[in-house]
């Protein structure tokens, strides 16, 4: 078997099992199995595939057919021009969360920030890369996620400007970091009844504690809002990723003490995605 034949085999298997991005995923799984770039895969289809590589490809295809996330299979995900290590226990970074970073950069130019529920560390590392005099506190309650956040942080030049902190609430952060200029977060915001409706890649593999936001999807959002004012400098900003217009309506009806909701930003599909509050 050569690479071209293996690529066609992979594509057929993924298509037959209903994978919507079969062509791209076949290429990525082939590059993973063969240890080559996608460019090399396409340029040299006659290159022979070793038996061990063929066996590895079959194993990767089996995992993907069972809907294991491609990012978990490959051990990495791209975010903000970075290749981050990810795996089980860690939410896979998503394109809509880059909008959270983009919006944060509009309001935050220097100082200290808190990344609530840092997960892989994607948001904090993106902000540290863009705001080179800033300092970031990366708060995470999951030991499994902290493992991945640390693997990503240690590969950067930001270690002297970041602190990875194991905690489950705003009350748990070190007092030496208060006050903050920015709080940013991607809390769980999927309503509990909707978890069962998620695509199997997410429902079966990604950590539910990073997805399930309670009956309305706002349990963690409201907890953050309740404590944010005492941590922010006057004029400081809180940005959270949320799950749509219905949640925005709820948040408008229940204003947070000392915080003004100043902006709602939509994602590329037109869904309300980022909410911004400013400390009076």
Image: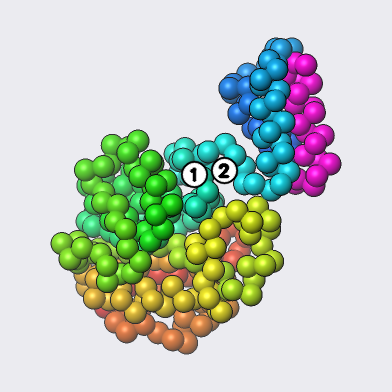
- Identify the residue at horizontal 50%, vertical 64% (top origin): 209
Residue 148 at x, y = what percent?
A: 42, 46
Residue furthest to the left: 176
Q: Quadrant of residue 10?
A: top right
Q: From what the image shows, is residue 40 above or below residue 257?
A: above
Give the camera-side residue of 136 and 237.
Answer: 136
Give the camera-side residue of 280 and 219.
Answer: 219
Residue 82 at x, y = what percent?
A: 44, 39
- Quick check: marks 1 and 2 in contact, CB under 8 Å? yes
Regarding residue 214, the answer to whether it shows in the image is yes
Magenta stretch holds residue 3: yes
Q: From what the image shows, is residue 215 above or below residue 159?
A: below
- Left or right side of 90 for 246: right
**Mark 1 → mark 2, Cα distance in angstroms:** 6 Å
Secondary structure of the residue carrying tag 1 is loop
Give the crowd class for mark 1: few <14, some 14-19, many >=20 residues within 10 Å.
Answer: many
Which residue, given by chain and number where applicable, does mark 1 sit on?
86
Q: How is the image coloured?
A: rainbow
Residue 172 at x, y = what percent?
A: 27, 67
Q: Quadrant of the C terminus?
A: bottom left
Q: Which mark is residue 72?
A: 2
Q: Quadrant of residue 230?
A: bottom left
Give the crowd class for mark 2: few <14, some 14-19, many >=20 residues within 10 Å.
Answer: many
Q: Which residues are magenta?
A: 1-21
- Identify the residue at horizontal 39%, vertical 66% (top origin): 239
Magenta stretch holds residue 246: no
- Left or right side of 272 for 15: right
Disc count in the image?
Answer: 2
- Left or right side of 48 for 231: left
Residue 257 at x, y = what percent?
A: 32, 84
Q: Quadrant of the N terminus?
A: top right
């Amino acid at each position: 078997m050569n690479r071209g034949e293996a690529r066609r085999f992979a594509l057929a298997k993924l298509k037959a099992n209903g994978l919507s991005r079969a062509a791209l995923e076949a290429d990525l799984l082939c590059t993973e199995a063969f240890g080559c770039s996608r460019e090399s895969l396409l340029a040299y289809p006659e290159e022979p595939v070793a038996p061990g590589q063929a066996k590895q490809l079959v194993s990767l295809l089996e995992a993907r057919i069972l809907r294991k996330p491609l990012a978990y299979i490959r051990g990495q995900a791209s975010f903000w021009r970075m290749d981050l290590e990810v795996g089980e226990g860690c939410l896979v970074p998503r394109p809509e969360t880059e909008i959270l970073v983009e919006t944060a950069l509009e309001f935050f130019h220097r100082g200290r920030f808190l990344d609530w529920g840092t997960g892989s560390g994607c948001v904090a590392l993106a902000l540290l890369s863009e705001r080179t005099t800033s300092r970031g506190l990366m708060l995470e309650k999951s030991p499994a996620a902290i493992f991945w956040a640390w693997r990503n942080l240690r590969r950067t030049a930001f270690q002297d400007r970041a602190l990875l902190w194991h905690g489950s609430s705003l009350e748990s952060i070190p007092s030496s970091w208060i006050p903050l200029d920015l709080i940013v977060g991607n809390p769980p915001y999927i309503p509990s009844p909707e978890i069962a409706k998620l695509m199997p890649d997410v429902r079966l593999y990604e950590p539910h504690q990073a997805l399930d936001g309670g009956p309305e999807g706002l349990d963690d959002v409201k907890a953050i809002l309740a404590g944010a004012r005492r941590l922010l400098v006057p004029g400081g900003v809180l940005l959270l990723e949320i799950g749509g217009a219905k949640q925005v309506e709820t948040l408008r009806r229940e204003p947070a003490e000392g915080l003004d909701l100043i902006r709602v930003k939509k994602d590329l599909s037109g869904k309300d995605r980022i909410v911004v509050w400013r400390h009076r």
